[in-house]
Image (tube, grey):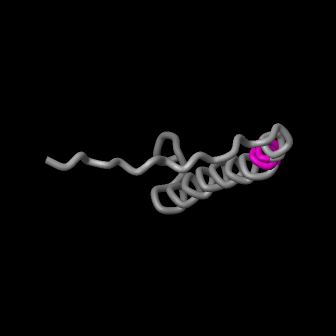
Amino acid sequence: MSELVQPQPTERPPRSRRAELLTFLVLAFGIWPVVAVGVVGGYGFLVWMLQIIFGPPGPPGH
């Protein structure tokens, strides 16, 4: 019976501290603020569209 040979995972060199810091800064001050503004803006747009379709909240007839 032949032995199953499993491929060895290729080892990646450890990331340098500078590359890790740069990645953090890009995420923290670049990507996440854009995502946050997009989510809040999308929610506001959704509420606006729903109010156009169904009217503003509150008791009817005022």
Is 24 inside the magenta-drawn segment? yes
**Which residue ends up furthest to the top in the rendered image?**
17
Q: Position of residue 53 (x, y in %)?
A: 47, 62
Main SS of residues in magenta: helix
Q: Is residue 18 above or below residue 53?
A: above
Q: Is residue 38 left or right of residue 49?
A: right
Q: Is residue 52 left or right of residue 31?
A: left
Residues rendered magenta in the picture: 23-29
Q: Nearer the viewer, residue 14 or 51?
A: 14
Q: Residue at x 67, y 55 (%)?
A: 38
Q: Is residue 4 above or below residue 54?
A: above
Q: Nearer the viewer, residue 38 or 47?
A: 38
Q: Position of residue 2 (x, y in %)?
A: 19, 49
Q: Is residue 59 left or right of residue 37?
A: left
Is 51 inside the magenta-drawn segment? no
Q: Position of residue 56 (x, y in %)?
A: 54, 50
Q: Residue at x 80, y 51 (%)?
A: 30
Q: Position of residue 44 (x, y in %)?
A: 63, 52
Q: Residue at x 26, y 47 (%)?
A: 4
